[in-house]
Amino acid sequence: MLEAAVIFVAGIYAGMINTIVGSGTLITFPTLLLFGYPALTANVSNNIGLVAGGVSGTYGYRHEARELKTTLVRLAPASILGAVTGSVLLLTLPDSSFDAIVPALIALALVMVVIGPAIQRRVAQRKLDRGADLDRVSPALFAGIFGLGVYGGYFGAAQGILLMGLLGILLSAGIQALNGLKNVLGTLVNAVAAVAFMVFAWDRIDWKIVALIGGGSLVGGVLGARIGRRLPPLVLRAIILTIGTLALVKIIWFD
């Protein structure tokens, strides 16, 4: 009962953090390892469970996401293809394959979150000068979303932070709208990967874990949307930087 309670609470926290920022996996995945679950089983079951939190968080951010509906339609195929690729890699490559690159990716994302507003303004001005669509999906953005889909399908820790960094650099929308878009794309990646796992790795799934994390993250996603949508842009950006830095420290020194 104690184990179940801890995993459920970890799911709540992960769902809340994923909706506001991202990196909830860094809460639930180590919790599962602490209780002795095999790494692949923990990763696969955790991924499936967190889909519920993504759905509730996305619903909570539905109005913000709707502002970028056209952009979402254009980017969704990249996330889907990336998620399929990443889930296949997870089932075929060693667990340590992404260990070296994850800290570098998170550090890069944090830098992009910091410098994003300045670059956004410059890019937007250049597009206005050329009479271009401010939120046109560039090849760089499409490729970046595909790459993060691969990462999300493989492991996904801090996927939300990476998405916010990339979207903040290459799109001109406000941070809350970008957060809504991030929630949809991140949930799409998790959902596609979850389907792939259920098809190709059914024996690796622990449905008790899925139920506990799924129930917890469903509640957490609702709470995260209520909190996140009320945060001023500067505060939200500060929270992203804080949690991202903590995630980076954890991965480098404590994993």
Image: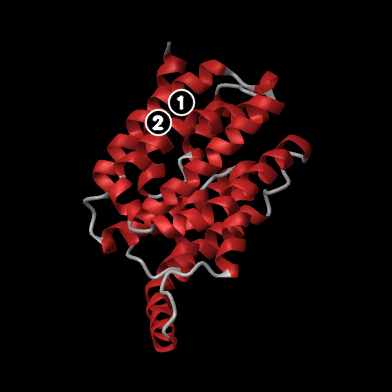
- Residue 213 is marked as 1
Q: Which residue is drawn at the image coordinates 54% and 29% (left, top)? A: 48
Q: Disc 1 residue type? A: Ile
Residue 210, percent across and down?
51, 22
Residue 193, percent across and down?
60, 37
How far, Cα to Cα, is label 2 from label 1? 6 Å
Question: For numbered disc 1, what is the local secondary structure?
Answer: helix
Does 131 appear above or below 1? below
| Mark 2 in CB contact with mark 1 (< 8 angstroms) | yes
Q: Which residue is drawn at the image coordinates 56% and 57% (left, top)? A: 145
- Residue 109 is marked as none
Nearest the viewer among 127 and 13 is 127
Farthest residue, direction bottom: 129
91 relative position to 190: left or right: right
Q: In which quarter of the image is the N terminus?
A: top left
Farthest residue, direction top: 1
Which residue is denoted by mark 2 in the rendering? 217
Nearest the viewer among 232 and 68 is 68
Does 199 appear above or below 223? above
Q: In which quarter of the image is the C terminus?
A: top right
Question: For numbered disc 2, what is the local secondary structure?
Answer: helix
Q: Disc 2 residue type? A: Ser
Residue 43, percent across and down?
60, 32
Q: Which residue is drawn at the image coordinates 46% and 55% (left, top)? A: 72
Q: Would you say residue 22 is visible in this rendering?
A: no
Residue 79, percent across and down?
57, 50
Q: Which residue is drawn at the image coordinates 46% and 63% (left, top)? A: 167
* Label 2: few (<14), some (14–19) or many (≥20) C-alpha neighbours in 10 Å: many
